[in-house]
Image: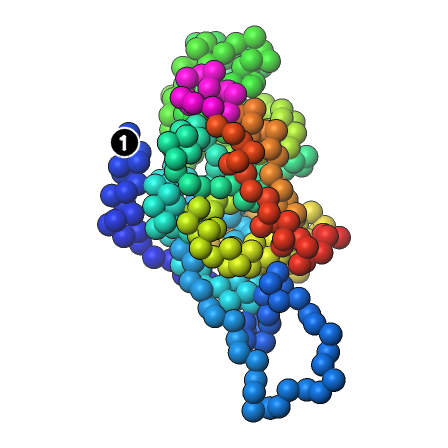
Amino acid sequence: MVARRGLTAGIVLTAALALSGACKPAEPAAQSAPASVQPAATAPAAAPAPSQPTAPPQVETLRGGVLASTTDAGIFIAQDLGYFREQGIELDLSTFDSAARMVAPLGAGQLDIGAGAHSAGLNNAISRGVDIKLVADKGSATPGHGFQALVFRKELVDSGQLRSPADLRGRRVAVSARGITVEVALATWLRRAGLSMDDVEPVEMGFPDQVNAIGNGSLDATISIEPFLTRIVDLNVGTIYQRTDELIPGYQVAEVFYAGQFMREQPDVARRFMVAYLKGVRYYNDAFDKGDAAKRQETINILTRNTTVKDAALYDRMVMPGLAPDGHLNVASISEDQDYFLAAGLQQQRIDINTLIDHSFADAAVQALGPYQ
């Protein structure tokens, strides 16, 4: 199970200031050397004396932030199946309601790892010198993984008033927040229909609240994610117009963050974390993409324990996010989002995306694990 702790007062204060300006457990770490840092050596001519056993790697406790969403699957699988323990790592996880609230504690070294999404707010923090890197994929809309979609109110679809994004002019459309990937997706749909964000009435509203709002008529459309998409359809109050994997194939939605201080002071531990994380991601891909029934059931068990999606039956109906088995991010997608944030006035200064992204830890993990088959 995932160990969780509440945020300390210091983290909460720091975050407030910033916002204002997956199966049997693996053997203990003592019997399993970190794959990325202790490759197998040629067997010695004579075995070491029994009185001199190999010392286990030092266990490191890492502080991480998660959203408890299905895009956190790689972390939760690696935690519950003992992959982090294999690497001499214990995770102390805190659940956040927004990735934006992770930025300040990551920048202050109060979190080592974050699991969220890039945004205009993150880019603004980077431009002010906050030291955070995007180091691995944590959710993308690769083909078949359109876990984010544009939804129209069913009443308006049935009456013929809403047939395409071109019919959204003057209508209330929900986004969970401004300056994040859902807004970029909405703006893309609108642009292709000859409209802009200025032609609609954006309503900031959390995903859970959107389900009732589209049902009672206070919203005309929304950009939502799973499992809320499936819930809207199940309630027969909304119709999915199109999913993001059809709109922007491969769209980068979420990432794993490393705090700069963590990367500098514990680079070996950072590599070991990534080995465990990508083992979890590959288990996930075996479960949902390769159709391994046993791994799928175990993964569903893990996700119902650790995420906000507690109804196991939903996993048979909703679309799951894509998780890259090599950890690589869609750099072009992140760069295009920055262009939008700048044009929309949500980001004040352009940053070098190539310095924001660091694939070296994922590359080291793939070298240790081998290519995904």
Question: Residue 346 in magenta?
Answer: yes
Tell me the magenta residue range.
Answer: 338-350
In the rendered view, does 185 fall on the left or right side of 295?
A: left
Q: Residue 49 location, x and y as percent?
A: 62, 90
Identified at 68% across, 87% down, the residue is: 47
Identified at 48% across, 34% down, the residue is: 118
In the rendered view, does 205 fall on the left or right side of 342?
A: left
Instruction: Work out whether 236 lies above or below 87.
Output: above
Q: Residue 72 location, x and y as percent?
A: 51, 48
Dot 1: what SS? helix
Residue 246, quarter of the rendered image: top right
Q: Residue 176 location, x and y as percent?
A: 42, 30
Residue bearing mark 1: 20
Identified at 51% across, 36% down, the residue is: 356
Q: How is the image coloured?
A: rainbow
Residue placed most toward the observer, 354 or 100: 354
Residue placed most toward the observer, 263 or 192: 263
Identified at 27% across, 38% down, the residue is: 16
Q: Amino acid at mark 1?
A: Ser
Residue 323 appears anywhere in the view: no
Residue placed most toward the observer, 313 or 144: 144
Question: Residue 142 in magenta?
Answer: no
